[in-house]
Amino acid sequence: MNYTTISDKITPLQLEFAARCISDAQSIAIITHQNPDGDALGSSLAMRHFLLSLGKTNVTNIVPTSFPDFLAWLPGVDSVIQYEQNPDAATSALRNADLVICTDLAEPTRVAALSPILTERFNRYAASRDSRDSVSSANSALLILDHHLSKVCNEYPEQIAYPDSASASELVFRLAYQLTQTQNVREDRGFVGVLSEDFATCIYTGMMTDTGNFSYNSCHPEMYNIVAILLTTGINKDAIYDRVFNAWSAERMQLVGYCLYHKMKLFPEYHTALITLNRREMYRFNAKSGDMEGIVNMPLQIKDIYYSIFMREDKIPPHQIPDANGAKVKAKISFRSQGDRPVNILAREVFRGGGHMNASGGEFFGNVDDAAKKFIEVMPQYMQKQ
Ligand SMILES: [Mn+2]
């Protein structure tokens, strides 16, 4: 069987740039966004496996903050340096690597306490790019693979940024695949790298988690060609599903039950559901940040509910204290909608956030009850009655 019909999404310019960066680099640091999810960790570890298969030996994976337990089995995960546990090693790897690769990440400010160092790295790279001589000179090369909506979007060859891709893992796959399949790149660079089972496991995990097990953002036929190629490496996709999705703690299950039974308010006229969770409630269920993941999507399973809003209380991080007008806590807010009903406008105009039409985020300085009041006040302006 031949499944290898994959279009050349990564442009020749991007491909040549990536090939050159990787060839030239002795040491490579791979970093992904804070609170890494399946795609963040999957894409960055897949990149690791690919680079190792090319014969690169000095490859460091860095995460700014901890990742959820249900990802702790991913191949290569033991090599990951978490900044909070090992700030010196993370900082020095990021500072000193010849090449920094950002996966599922294009904004240098989305890496928590590492933001100043990554920002400096981005600036140093931009300066070397503008001076136009050696882009891949030591300690300044940069490569970005991301699919978030951001200012970064293929303007420069180091930016492999495609918001129409369902996952960063898909982009890492495409890069690895094109690098190893494109005749002249293979010959010029000797990129015979292997798409190993470990690589495929990480890619599949990222593709699966960022599409809710292929239930949204998942209508592109080529996605399934990629899955088919991954399966030929011997991965067991059903086992991956089981490890990622059937791994809840009892407390998490009870927290979800509590949210749906006690905390969900429905506004049928506006086809809207709202769930709030305060600090006391999160403490009661020993809730970790990953435990709240996905709760916002659940009310959309109710017939005739098209909008869902989930608010949870959080501390105000030090850098936001000047903006917070004396508030002690903030509400972190997720917005979801279905069909032609934007939530990003509401997120942007009222809740200091933004995002995609059907999936956005925002925040409110104050407790969740006040955030909910604010939302209910503006609901008639932003939610459609049909
Ligand atoms: Mn992602």
Image (cartoon, grey):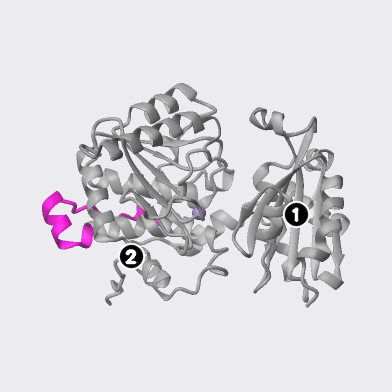
Give whichever of 206, 179 is nearer the camera: 179
Residue that label 1 marks: 310
Q: Residue at x 51, y 35 (%)?
A: 64
Residue 132 at x, y percent in the picture: 24, 40
Which image quadrant for residue 124?
top left
The correct choice, above or below, for 72 with respect to 191 in the image is: above
The correct choice, above or below, for 106 with respect to 121 in the image is: below
Residue 182 among magenta residues: yes
In the image, farthest residue toward the front: 131
Residue that label 2 marks: 9
The correct choice, above or below, for 318 with respect to 272 in the image is: above
Q: Label 1 vs label 2: CA separation? A: 35 Å
Residue 244 at x, y percent in the picture: 56, 54
SS category of the residue bearing label 1: strand
SS category of the residue bearing label 2: loop
**Quadrant where the C terminus is found in the figure:** bottom right
Q: Which residues are magenta?
A: 180-201
Q: Horizontal placement of 324 versus 54: left or right?
A: right
Q: Horizontal placement of 154 versus 22: left or right?
A: right
